[in-house]
Image (spheres, grey):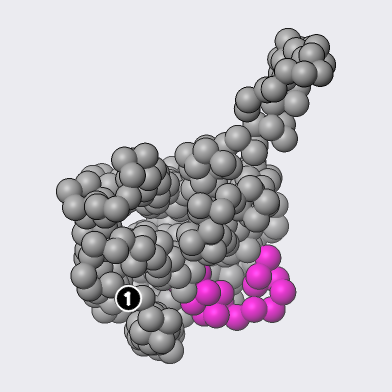
Amino acid sequence: MSAMTLTSDPKLLEYYQTNYSLNCVKNESYFNSNEFFQRFTYIVSPFSVILGSYGILVVLMATPKHMESVKWFLMHYHLVTFFIELTMNKLIAPLIFLPSSAIYCNGFLLDLGVPFKLVMYISEISFLELSISMLMIFENRHSQILTISFRMTRTLTKSIFYSCHYLFFPSLLLLIYLQNVDQPAAKLEILQTIPCPERHFFDVRTQVVTTNMEFYAGISGISVIYFTVIIQFYALQSGYYLLKRPEAYLSDVMKKMQRKFFFILVIQIAIPVLFMLIPNVIYYSVDVVDQFVSTLTVIFVSLHGIASSLALILLHKPYRDFTWDQTLGRIFKSPGKKSSSHSVRPNTVTMF
């Protein structure tokens, strides 16, 4: 655990030594502390790294030919969720002081000399990339359904479409991160709302992203609404055509396979999204947002990576079979099958 380095601002230091020490220290608890959050990240990080790395391996090694059209989209989505998980648990590990934008970074990016605003901008961009990766998956499925009249099939059209997303939304975020924030004044203003924050609020590493939370919420709201609508458009239309208007020339077996694969994709994306929604439910359902609630929001977001990796590995049969064959399948392989394979007569034809 790294030792705290108190702020040198006289007003903040005075507040810490008087108001905070007299009125807040007695109410401190382990679950409201940064130590609790750090221990959680230390415990979870090995599992997230192992599962995330294995997810990359399984997509590269076990993707069958009939999934080639979606292979790199699955890889893209998995890499983004894995990266977000790494930022939440290791690279940034943000202790957030909700409902403000003050953040204490436990991760080692700041120790490497990366500026605070760049670190947080990378974090924001990763969540934006997650939305784009979801859009890519459903748009790709949409473009594969021939009975849909209006599809994006040309490479140039898709390049322009996604380039606009990569230019517009990061530019919106820059409007926030290019603002100059008077850190001592911003922290003193936050103390009017949160008079007893976790003690690391007074550390020099704690910085405020923005004081204009309404503007920040507006930009975030625009992004969330847009991606929710456009992803649902591609997902719902694809689902409708697969269920109600499938391609006439396809066999029933192929139709069933397409529907099953589509619904697996929906479930695979819905599971980590659920972990992203839970923090919002917690945040808006409590009367008082203390540090424990703030920490829980980050914890649930960080767990979405593990949930996403497990969904990838377990929901898709080729990946599930590969995992079984390379791990427990080798241990629990039926001895009867081994002996029967050696006892087949020379003239016998076996079917498998």
Residue 201 seen in render: no
Closer to the camera in the image, 44 or 180? 44
Seen in the image, is 258 located left or right of residue 233? right
The residues colored magenta run 108-124
Please say if 287 is above or below 223: above
In the image, residue 119 lies at what x, y percent?
56, 74
Seen in the image, is 55 located left or right of residue 154? right
In the image, residue 334 lies at what x, y percent?
71, 15
At label 1, the amino acid type is: Met
Instruction: Residue under label 1, please give it.
Output: 152
Closer to the camera in the image, 186 or 269? 269
Return the residue found at the far left: 244
**Dot 1 lies on which element?**
loop
Going 65% across and 37% down the picture, which residue do you hit? 323
Query: Quarter of the image holding residue 79?
Result: bottom right
Asked whether 121 falls inside the magenta stretch, the response is yes
Seen in the image, is 177 located left or right of residue 335? left
Return the residue found at the far front: 347
Asked whether 337 falls inside the magenta stretch, the response is no
> How many numbered discs sit on the rendered protein?
1
Q: Residues within 10 Å of mark 1 (few under 14, many from 20)?
A: some
In the image, residue 25 lies at what x, y percent?
49, 48
Residue 64 seen in render: yes
Going 32% across and 75% down the picture, which residue do you hit? 152
In the image, residue 68 lies at what x, y percent?
53, 58
Closer to the camera in the image, 128 or 28? 128
Quadrant placement of the C terminus:
top right
Closer to the camera in the image, 100 or 54? 54
Going 41% across and 86% down the picture, which residue do you hit? 156
